[in-house]
């Protein structure tokens, strides 16, 4: 994964030890964020049962997310697009390799596993692994810069760059939601939770999201969020929660949690998972871009 360069700058060749260290950071990040998924039976079954076109779409969607994170992560908008495409491809490849290695070592892929089942499991697992690789390579080690008032001001101004904020928040929501969505507990909670509790869960999710984004100030959050006006806080909280619900719905749909369920049951599952997604979208938005 290459360093950010201006669009007209020549591409720098990195020494092999530096590349190996960066790959090591990426693998560590991939495992840190995805290990629960690699040990989850429901995810293995999703790999077995997913249609090949769904698996291909999931792979392409993961690559698009990686492009977004590598383009907007840290708001390095002077990054070379060639680096964005190649970095994303490397991270996706590492995700596939790490997923394959772990699934083989824990005995989920054996000689008796069909090619379609093996490919399905690896791709389904590799999505979160690859996003973790991208975050890990950027955050574990790397460049430790001293605080710079001018850089802080540029980052504060970047908080108004809506596409960047949406991409970062979506990546954070995926990292959190994907570790919970495949489990049976989401369905069980949705079945047993009455509407008034679902409403309370939705309110709690928005309150926590707003608190993390605009009040906690951990990792110097003021550098990345606008809070000059009350409407900025309200809009940021509502948009973050809406994005978290969208992420929850997409992840639940991919793992087949909507099949055979009515609209009310589907909405209940989305709201239940929305708490985890909101935490990922808000905390992740601050943590993975800092």
Image (tube, grey):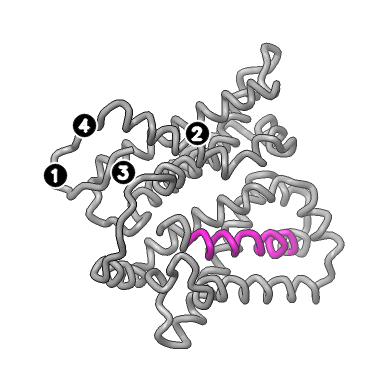
Q: Position of residue 151 (x, y in %)?
A: 26, 66
Q: Which residue is mark 1?
A: 9
Q: Which residue is mark 2?
A: 95
Q: Nearer the viewer, mark 1 or mark 3?
A: 1
Task: Look at 35% across and 72% down and name the residue there.
Answer: 160
Q: Nearer the viewer, mark 2 or mark 4?
A: 4
Q: Nearer the viewer, mark 1 or mark 4?
A: 4
Q: Which residue is mark 3?
A: 84
Residue 118 badge: none
How many labels sit on residues? 4
Q: Secondary structure at mark 3?
A: helix
Q: Secondary structure at mark 1?
A: loop
**Residue furthest out toward the top:** 111
Q: CA distance from mark 3 to mark 4?
A: 15 Å
Task: Look at 69% across and 24% down and name the residue there.
Answer: 106
Where the C terminus falls, by quadrant?
bottom left
Q: Which residue is mark 4?
A: 13
Left or right: residue 52 versus residue 60 is right
Q: Is residue 261 magenta?
A: no
Left or right: residue 49 versus residue 236 is right
Mark 1 Cα-neighbour bin, 10 Å: few <14, some 14–19, many ≥20: few
Task: Look at 41% across and 74% down and name the residue there.
Answer: 222
Relative to residue 27, is residue 274 depicted above or below?
Answer: below
Which stretch appears magenta?
A: 268-285
Q: Is residue 278 magenta?
A: yes
**Residue furthest out toward the right:** 192
Task: Look at 37% across and 61% down and name the residue there.
Answer: 164
Relative to residue 105, is residue 29 depicted above or below?
Answer: below
> Mark 1 or 3 closer to N-term?
1
Where the N terminus falls, by quadrant?
top left
> Mark 3 or 2 closer to N-term?
3
């Amino acid at each position: 994964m290459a360093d950010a360069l201006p669009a007209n700058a020549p591409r720098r060749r990195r020494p092999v030890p530096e590349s190996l260290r960066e790959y090591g950071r990426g693998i560590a990040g991939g495992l840190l964020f995805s290990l629960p998924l690699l040990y989850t039976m429901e995810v293995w079954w999703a790999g077995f049962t997913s249609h090949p076109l769904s698996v291909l779409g999931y792979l392409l969607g993961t690559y698009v997310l990686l492009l977004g994170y590598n383009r907007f992560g840290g708001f390095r908008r002077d990054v070379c697009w060639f680096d964005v495409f190649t970095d994303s491809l490397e991270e996706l490849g590492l995700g596939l390799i790490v997923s394959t290695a772990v699934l083989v070592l824990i005995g989920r892929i054996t000689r008796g596993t069909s090619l379609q089942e093996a490919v399905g499991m690896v791709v389904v697992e590799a999505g979160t692994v690859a996003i973790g690789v991208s975050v890990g390579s950027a955050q574990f080690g790397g460049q430790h810069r001293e605080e710079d008032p001018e850089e802080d001001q540029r980052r504060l101004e970047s908080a108004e760059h809506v596409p960047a904020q949406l991409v970062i928040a979506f990546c954070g929501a995926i990292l959190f939601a994907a570790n919970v969505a495949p489990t049976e507990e989401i369905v069980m909670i949705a079945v047993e939770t009455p509407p008034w509790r679902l409403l309370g869960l939705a309110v709690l999710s928005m309150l926590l999201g707003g608190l993390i984004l605009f009040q906690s100030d951990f990792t110097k959050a003021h550098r990345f969020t606008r809070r000059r006006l009350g409407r900025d806080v309200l809009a940021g909280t509502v948009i973050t929660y809406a994005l978290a619900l969208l992420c929850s719905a997409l992840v639940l749909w991919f793992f087949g949690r909507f099949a055979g369920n009515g609209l009310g049951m589907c909405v209940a599952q989305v709201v239940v998972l929305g708490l985890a997604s909101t935490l990922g979208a808000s905390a992740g938005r601050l943590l993975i871009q800092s």
